Amino acid sequence: MGRLYAVEIVYRGIFQKNLAKNISRAIVLAAHKEGKPGISFGRYGDSPERNGIPAKAFAIVATDDVTLEEGMAKYEPQEVDVSICVDDTLFKGVESWAWYGLQPINKLVKPGGTLIVTSLQSPETLAEIAHRKAAPYNLAVVKAQPSFSGLWVYKDDHTDVRILGTIAKVLPELFGLGSLQEFIREEWNDDLKVKSAQRAFERVQLYTVQPNQGNPEEPYKFDMPKWTEMREGIAIPSIPRGHAITDPVDGKQGGFKAARNLTFKKYATRTMRPVIDFDKCIKCTLCWLACPDSVFDVTPDGFYDADMLACCGCGVCEAVCPEPECITMINETAFTDNASQWEAWRKNHDEYEKWVHTTIADRPERSHGFRFRGQYEEQVPDVLRIAQQS
Amino acid sequence: MAEAIIQSDQLKQKSVDKGDETSLITGSEAIAVACKLADVDVITGYPIRPYDTVMQYIAKLVANGDMDCEYIIAEGEHSQFEVVKHASACGARVFCGSSGVGWMYAMEALTVTPALRIPMVAMVGNRALDDPGAFGVEHNDALAVRDLGWQLVWVDSAQEALDTALIAYRVAEDRRVFLPCAISCDGAFLTHSQGLVKVPSREKVDAFLPRYNRGDLLLHPDNPITVAPQANEDWLMEIRRQTAAAMERSPQVIREAYQHFTKVFGRDYGNPFFEEYMTDDADVVLVGMGTLSTPVKVTIRQLRQEGKKVGFVRVRWFRPFAAEELAKTLSRFKAVGVIDRDFSLGSPFHSGVLATETRTALYPSAKRPPVLGFICGLGGREVTVPDVRKMSEKLYEAASGKQQPLTQWIGLRE
């Protein structure tokens, strides 16, 4: 038996589909320069993809055909040498289309394996966001924003080759820098891309994440029922009705909190979230009406509180809100929990207002959402600045 | 919902028939009468020969005020079956049907019906599939759904058509089953032939056939459920297993239904799954489905006078297939000849569907007689007495050890 190499790419559905495909294909083709056979595929269950839904692509390479076949006997790998995450908001966990619960971003990384992520955050911060893992693993940060490279009108920002250069460094047995550069030259005929790969190769810094680092929370799971436990006729019981909300300050009951799907929470799809300044809210109901996922609960005092377990971060609420800075979409990396904003506002008004002003004033770079289409043009100068700094 | 039930109860009171009446009706009309007696709520129709004879008769019953139902003429077979599927999900007793390529046009709807556990009763007026455009009987139309969870039954007389339709509702709507049931009636020989039929009273039918109760699967605002969502690879096997389990429970429910039928109506069909004719002392037997039973039985009587002990097994329920019982019966004989009014091109030995299933059923038996497949009576061609004589001769040859092709076309110009 030879050696098997498995790499996964965790990406945002549709937005980063082509980027992920380009990377997984390049891994196989670069390794093939060294005579290794390989297979590249997208997770079939993620298709048809929806905007922003966490999705996966895989590249499986081996030193010989028999080893590759042995590896492919389990189609979707259970562990990988390298995990690639092309959007750091996925560090909070990955919830797939189906009802699998939440998977830690580092779940498939082998002990001592490497998780490569494109991010502007420090490895220390990222290590704390990801769930805890029993064995140490390495983190390699490629300084970059979540890339749309390869998607329709979005231009090539070299994210693909920067990640490939990083792989050549952290797992040289898979493919060396020379083979990679040879492949890049053939595939794109672009010396600049060859250079980007080399730069990334030279600049990689590995940060080892220890078992005591990271989010200690047990990610929510869902036990799949036996066939005898399921209702027949493909009939799914509805979600039960919701209940009134209790005001944390005066104990007053009222409003309505919807009981939402317990087995598919959706928040892993979110890359930005609405920050609500309740002082500015005029209770016009538009956010509540327009939200495509019905995430707004009505509070006893008649405000609208977005349930952060259900919000996909589409930004429609911000778009329909008539009050300036009442609802502001902020990149998901700025938050560490899914707690109720209204409760925080009720409990400590002044502190909350301070937090809102700071958060929206110093808002981190926006991520992809349905609303923010002009993003790429606005981001070009930033991307250039990041490239020069790193 | 409750209001609708009260209304239909009142109507039921008004239109009760008194006692059995003898009517001269076709097999199609017998099915229509069964729909009336079963107080079917929603019926859809789209004309195609020979099935259209059922919808014409139902239209007449409705127009004359003899029957109260939602009678919907759809714009095609696909819609026709979709409409009743949804009505059944909402708790309505439904009826639908088609023939030949019409049945095939409804295929998508036919596919989803068993998985959704819709106890629809349908009539297939068996007709050759195009091309060439032809009206005569072949069984390939109904057999096209044989793997999907449809219960399939073949009948050979108008009386049996009526009785089986009532039994079909009873079996399909049993909570242990909740699978659709298609009753196959041979085009022309049954759909267009009038026979004397005992039409039972409404009281008897009410005593036999309980109300359709969809329970927790009822699509209704008071029972909020989602039906038929998209599912990933982590759900399908469990759902398929549920449908399979329902089909596995069906034989017992069929047995109970026939027993109760005999008690209420006084007619005893014996073994529900297949009828045996002169098999007790038979050397060789023929096996077949539908109206070919008449020429086969007549020929057997002739052969008996000549000292040839030929028997006949007429399969009624093709799905569920009574494999063990059939194998037990057939393994007694020296040779078995299966007459298929269908074809299954490229199948093992290029046999018909029933021959292949029969061989499979016999495989686990300690004693396995040779099984010859006969393709006969396609496209409405008659299965004649000489045809049956020829097949019987071949069976005796097989019984004496003479090798011959496992599939033979009988009644073919050659």
Image (cartoon, coloured by chain):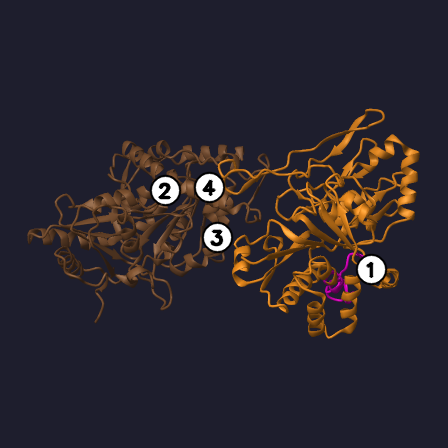
Chain colours: A orange, B brown
Disc 1 vs disc 3: which is toward the camera? Answer: 1
Q: Which residue is mark 4?
A: B242
Q: Chain of mark 4?
A: B
Label 3 crowd (10 A; few <14 / some 14-19 / many >=20)? many
Label 2 crowd (10 A; few <14 / some 14-19 / many >=20)? many
Q: Position of residue B269 (x, y in %)?
A: 25, 40
Task: Name the residue type under label 4.
Answer: Gln
Checking the image for residue B109, the label placed there is: 3
Q: Position of residue B246 (x, y in %)?
A: 42, 40
Task: Name the residue type under label 1.
Answer: Gln
Eyeballing the image, is B16 above or below B351? Answer: above
Disc 3 vs disc 4: which is toward the camera? Answer: 4
Residue at 73%, 65% in the rendered image: A150
Q: Chain of mark 1?
A: A
Q: Chain of mark 2?
A: B
Q: Secondary structure at mark 3?
A: helix
Task: Name the residue type under label 3.
Answer: Ala
Q: Nearer the viewer, residue B317 or B362?
A: B362
Q: Which residues are magenta?
A: A142-164
Q: Position of residue A172 (x, y in %)?
A: 69, 61
Checking the image for residue A375, the label placed there is: 1
Residue at 41%, 56% in the rendered image: B103
First in sequence: mark 3 vs mark 4: 3
Residue B391 falls in which quadrant of the image?
bottom left
Real-space Cα distance between discs 2 and 4? 20 Å
